[in-house]
Image (cartoon, rainbow, N blue to C red):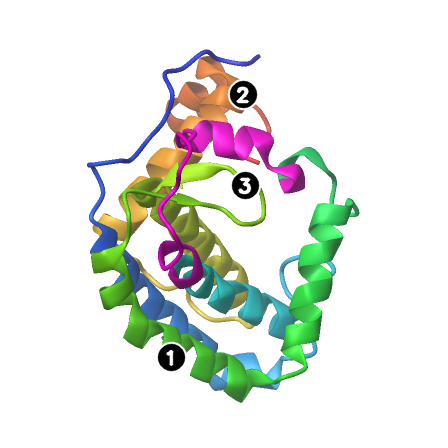
């Protein structure tokens, strides 16, 4: 059942600076020797090597810098829920072109190695403060042509950082980084909202409070 909910936006309710310590945790994880040692092994993400996953993770704050450094949007921004409703990678299965494209690009980048990935993570970390402070109110996503508010776009990258940090840590037997509430809370809110829209009130409430009546999954994607 699809639940009708108000449009979701984080504009004006987000501490953008939360992405800086989140990226620092990301960089610490990518630098771990366990990641380098398992570079060519399959990760917890099916069909993606540990190295490809590490680069995909590093690319999240890099994409943030790229987009927030671009021109201000000259069209009205869409909401976060509309952004995900349009996302091709959600609409397609794992073998769809949007998902295979991500894996292929990440595998190509993985050829640069673990040291290069760690250096890229540290480099983007030095740039985030300035970029966040100078970002326009709304930005255009080059890969879709749609606009998002800067705050909403930051939350989409925080979600990627939190989720894929867990993927990478589990791939190599490490403890998942523990993110600060300022970074984790908007991600949990976004995942919950998307799960509500996809599965409905009863499924989410029962999973959180009545596991004996809960469905098998309330995955947001």
Q: Residue at x 29, y 66 (%)?
A: 128
Label 1 secondary element: helix
Position in image of residue 183 (x %, y %): 28, 51
In the displayed structure image, the side of residue 144 where residue 160 appears, left or right: left
Q: Residue at x 56, y 28 (%)?
A: 85
Q: Residues within 10 Å of mark 3 (few under 14, many from 20)?
A: few
Mark 3 or 1, nearer chain start:
1
Pointers 2 and 1 in contact (C-beta within 8 Å): no
- Residue 113 vertical placement versus 71 (above, below): below
Q: Residue at x 44, y 38 (%)?
A: 147
Report whether residue 207 is seen. no
- Which residues fall within the magenta stretch? 65-89
- Circle 3 residue: 145
- Circle 2 residue: 199
Label 3 secondary element: loop
Pointers 3 and 1 in contact (C-beta within 8 Å): no
Position in image of residue 111 (x %, y %): 68, 81
Q: CA distance from mark 3 to mark 1?
A: 27 Å
Mark 2 or 3, nearer chain start:
3
- Circle 1 residue: 123
Q: CA distance from mark 2 to mark 1?
A: 40 Å
Numbered mark located on residue 49 in the image: none
């Amino acid at each position: 059942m699809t639940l009708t909910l108000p449009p979701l936006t984080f504009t004006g309710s987000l501490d953008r600076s939360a992405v800086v310590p989140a990226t620092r945790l990301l960089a610490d994880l990518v630098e771990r020797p366990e990641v380098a040692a398992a570079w060519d092994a399959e990760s917890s993400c099916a069909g993606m090597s540990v190295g490809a996953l590490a680069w995909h993770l590093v690319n999240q704050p890099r994409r943030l810098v790229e987009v927030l450094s671009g021109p201000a949007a000259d069209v009205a921004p869409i909401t976060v829920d509309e952004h995900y409703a349009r996302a091709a990678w959600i609409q397609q299965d794992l073998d769809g072109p949007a998902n295979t494209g991500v894996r292929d690009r990440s595998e190509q980048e993985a050829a640069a190695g673990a040291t290069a990935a760690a250096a890229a993570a540290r480099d983007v970390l030095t740039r985030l403060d300035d970029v966040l402070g100078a970002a326009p109110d709304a930005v255009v996503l080059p890969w879709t042509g749609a606009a998002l508010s800067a705050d909403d776009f930051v939350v989409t990258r925080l979600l990627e950082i939190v989720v894929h940090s867990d993927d990478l840590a589990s791939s190599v037997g490490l403890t998942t980084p523990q993110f600060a509430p300022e970074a984790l809370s908007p991600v949990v809110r976004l995942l919950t909202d998307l799960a509500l829209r996809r599965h409905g009130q009863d499924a989410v409430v029962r999973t959180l409070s009545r596991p004996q009546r809960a469905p098998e999954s309330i995955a947001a994607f």
